[in-house]
Image: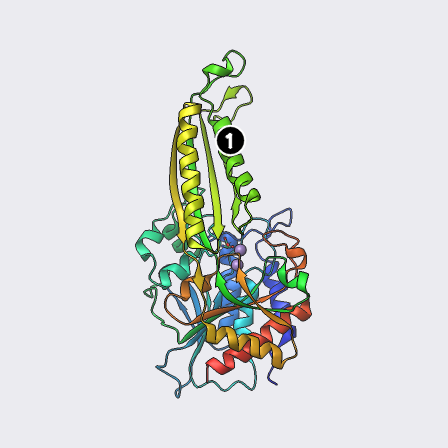
Amino acid sequence: MIAIDAKRLLGRIRELGAVGRNSEGRLIRLAASDTDRQGRDLFVGWLRQAGLDVAIDRVGNIFGIWQSPETMGQAPLLIGSHIDTVIDAGIYDGCYGVLAGLEVIKASGLSPSRPIAVAAFTNEEGVRYTPDMMGSLVHAGGIDAETVLAAVGTDGSVLGRELARIGYAGDLEPGFLTPHAYLELHIEQGPVLEREGLPIGAVENLQGISWQRVTIDGVANHAGTTPMSMRSDAGHAAARAITFLLDRAKASNAPTVATVGTIRFEPNAINVIPSRAVFTIDLRDPDEQRLQAEEAALAAYLEQLAATENVIISVEQLARFEPVIFDLRIVERIEAAAKSRGLGVRRMTSGAGHDAQMMARIAPAAMIFVPSAGGISHNTREHTEDAELVAGANILLDVAAQLAT
Ligand code: HGY
Ligand code: MN
Ligand code: MN
């Protein structure tokens, strides 16, 4: 059986994982930052070393393309993910799938009858600029490049300017490549595979995602002199809203998940009643109707809260993606490939967002998962065993070999 170069894959995951660490050793490669550039430069160097054509589009999506005179002009098989990270990231999220895609292209014994390309999409994480899965969303035609290039980051930067500054504002029109099929290999980032002792997940669907930013405006006042009955306390209103949202998700027997990952007060002083609270909501559910019902319940609560707390509440939608069903034929190929290598496999839902959910809009797409130790991700403790990483990459190779011939 053909196999990927395990040593090179594992070595490069660690080499890329060492890029973009700050003075305390924390891994932070936010989209279009200087550390993202360092990661991009390393990856592009490996693409050139592999003899691939390197293509960069206007929103900084990077493609390494293998083709031959015989395959030229045919729709390529595309294997992709991302190399930007969250804050205090692990070394596998996104990077594993991109580097495994490059190893598939370089695997000896592969004789594709169509081009194969590997992609690292811009700003999959959405931490600095929203929405997440941004580069693949542009590629799939879900948002136009101009809108994305004008996106203002949490640090006040503008994405288009940052891409130009780091040298990744390409001139290719996004969407220049329509894949024959799309594959993505990724760590599960959840507890299922490890709990069931399975090395491979054949991902058949991906849950819906709703990101919102809530701004609550009250009245700054003296913490000591203002009676509780006379306050318009943006901080208390925010606390009540967050408690409502999270208690409701906890009490639900549905798989709905809710997260408030960022919050800030103004003027943010110990003895001043907050005049403003701004926080973000990440709400997800595999069922679109239930997700809409959760959004509606929150909206109704906020309306009632504004009246009782005497504050003004405004909500901005930062991202909204419906659940996605992946291509069953590819899911079945993943299962069959695992079984033919004697690897346990199960179908599963992705709790995390991925570029595959955008590419599924323009091509048959599916994902392969490998276990995450302790189900932990978006955390420096993110870990997957070498043998599991190699097994997943070989399943990617097997399915790619079938789709590319
Ligand atoms: O938010 C997500 O699920 C992905 O990590 N961007
Ligand atoms: Mn990811
Ligand atoms: Mn992630």
Image spot of residue 290 (x, y percent): 45, 50
Is residue 26 shown above or below 187?
A: above
Image spot of residue 322 (x, y percent): 41, 56
Q: Residue at x 57, y 79 (%)?
A: 337
Image spot of residue 247 (x, y percent): 55, 39
For the image, the number of numbered tags is 1
Is residue 15 shown above or below 126?
A: below
Q: Is residue 90 left or right of residue 213?
A: right
Q: Kindly state the secondary structure of the residue where label 1 is placed.
A: helix
Dot 1 crowding, Cα within 10 Å, few <14, some 14–19, many 20+: some
Image spot of residue 404 (x, y percent): 46, 81
| Viewport quadrant of the N terminus | bottom right
Q: Work out whether residue 229 or residue 113 is closer to the camera in this orientation and state it.
A: 229
Q: Can see residue 316?
A: yes
Q: Is residue 324 left or right of residue 368?
A: left
Q: Is residue 199 left or right of residue 241?
A: right
Q: Which residue is mark 1?
A: 240
- Amino acid type of the residue that numbered disc 1 sits on in the rendered structure: Arg
Q: Residue at x 42, y 85 (%)?
A: 68
Residue farthest toward the front in the current orientation of the protein: 253
